[in-house]
Amino acid sequence: MKFNTKAIHGGQHHEKVTGAVMPPVFQTSTFAQSSPGKPIGEYEYSRAANPTRTALEDALASIENGTRGLAFSSGLAATDCVLRSFKAGDEIIAMDDLYGGTYRMFTRIYKDSGIKFHFVDMNDSAKFQSLINENTKLVWVETPTNPLMKLADIAAIAKITKEKNILFAVDNTFATPYLQRPLDLGADIVMHSATKYLGGHSDVIAGALVVKDSALGEQLHFQQFATGGTLGPMDSYLVLRGIKTLHLRMQRHCENGEKVVDFLKNHPKIGKVFFPGLPEHPFHEIAKKQMSGFGGMVSFNFKSGAKADAISFLEKLKVFTLAESLGGVESLANHPALMTHASIPEDKRIEIGITDDLVRLSVGIEDAEDLMADLRQALA
Ligand SMILES: *Cc1c(COP(=O)(O)O)cnc(C)c1O
């Protein structure tokens, strides 16, 4: 099955009793048993499994070319589930440009657990490999990153982690499986904030993990079941509904992203534009190799370097909404330093390039002319 068909049919079947084409929202916590320990159907208790969530999890596995999908109450709950596999003495190597909440979890929640974290530029392969030792258990990468659109070469990292028997997880939130499929490139775990493109309509907080290896899938499911960060039936339904148009939305996000980038590149007030589709982007070659398009996330700064310019621009936007989050049908704008990445200490922020004049756009699927007109008036 090709991707566009999988987005609609992957892992799906008509509901058994009524033939309903979309799975009903099985809004139930528990399922009847005919005799103690003998449930009437396949389900017992919705923390362990719920039919609406199963439908979503099967769709997730299908679109990422995995064998097992797990749906969580948020992207961070999905990440937390992976982190629970490790113990004091273990070491984790993570990319040095991560979603703020992921960085906060690693450095503030897990810092006293005895797990040692290394944050490294994944493109400095010598540095990365020098950090690997017998305690290294996990490599965590986000590509493209938020908000600077740095990339990591998934296949190259997978080659190293496979050799050394280290788990390799990729946060695929920005690219989505429409543009990039990390499991096919050798990663062990794909993580998503399904809040973003998979859900696609800014109406749900959700997370996902997908794996190819069934034993790893069992282990992660046990951790999820035992700690409880599962996605409810209504939210599972919403994400599943979102996935059915993922390919159409992503196609338009990519088209509009290119147009907005073209506009920004030619505007006299704009400094640097961060977008993996630009030939001068430092990771453009990796993007061409592992992604089938460049997405709708664009960051830029101002020639003036002034925070005031960024703020005045953001206040004047009318079609773009100033809000955290991304990946919905509507265009959003964000000031990383004051909003999504405020949890990163200032010196660290500046060091990685999240300056006070940096703006991040999530280009939606509106008419591109209206989006460009809005940017033009806000920059005037
Ligand atoms: C939003 C986001 C997360 C966290 O997901 P939540 O659903 O907000 O918990 C993780 N990674 C990336 C890249 C994100 O954009």
Image: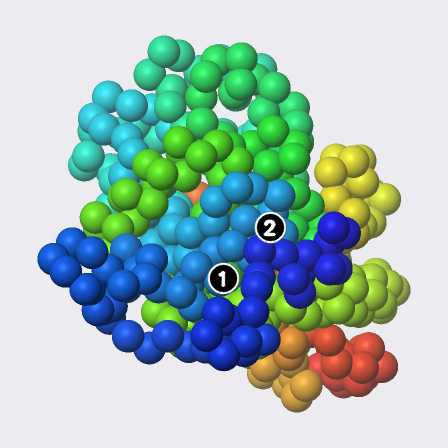
Indicate the position of residue 352 as horizontal and vertical percent values. 53, 43
Number of other residues with Cα within 10 Å of mark 2, as a class: few under 14, some 14 to 19, many 20 or more: many
Whether label 1 lies within 8 Å of ligand 1 gets the answer no
Q: Kindly identify the residue that appears in the image at 56 percent across and 32 percent down.
A: 187
Residue 178 figure quarter: bottom right
Whether label 2 lies within 8 Å of ligand 1 gets the answer no
Above or below: residue 212 compared with residue 12 = above
Q: Residue furthest front?
A: 34
- Nearer to me, 374 or 286: 286
Say the numbered circle drawn on residue 340. none
Question: Disc 2 residue type?
Answer: Ser
| Residue 357 seen in this snapshot | no
Q: Kindly identify the residue that appears in the image at 59 percent across and 37 percent down.
A: 183
Q: Which residue is mark 1?
A: 56
- Nearer to me, 127 or 191: 191
Residue 235 figure quarter: bottom left
Say the numbered circle drawn on residue 62. 2
Callout 1 secondary element: helix
On-image quarter of the C terminus = bottom right
Q: Kindly identify the residue that appears in the image at 78 percent across and 64 percent down.
A: 251
Number of other residues with Cα within 10 Å of mark 1, as a class: few under 14, some 14 to 19, many 20 or more: many
**Mark 2 and mark 1: span between their CA atoms?**
10 Å
Indicate the position of residue 257 as horizontal and vertical percent values. 77, 64
Indicate the position of residue 151 as horizontal and vertical percent values. 65, 40
Indicate the position of residue 69 as horizontal and vertical percent values. 47, 49
Left-right relation of 376 to 177: right
Above or below: residue 346 compared with residue 365 = above
- Nearer to me, 256 or 21: 21
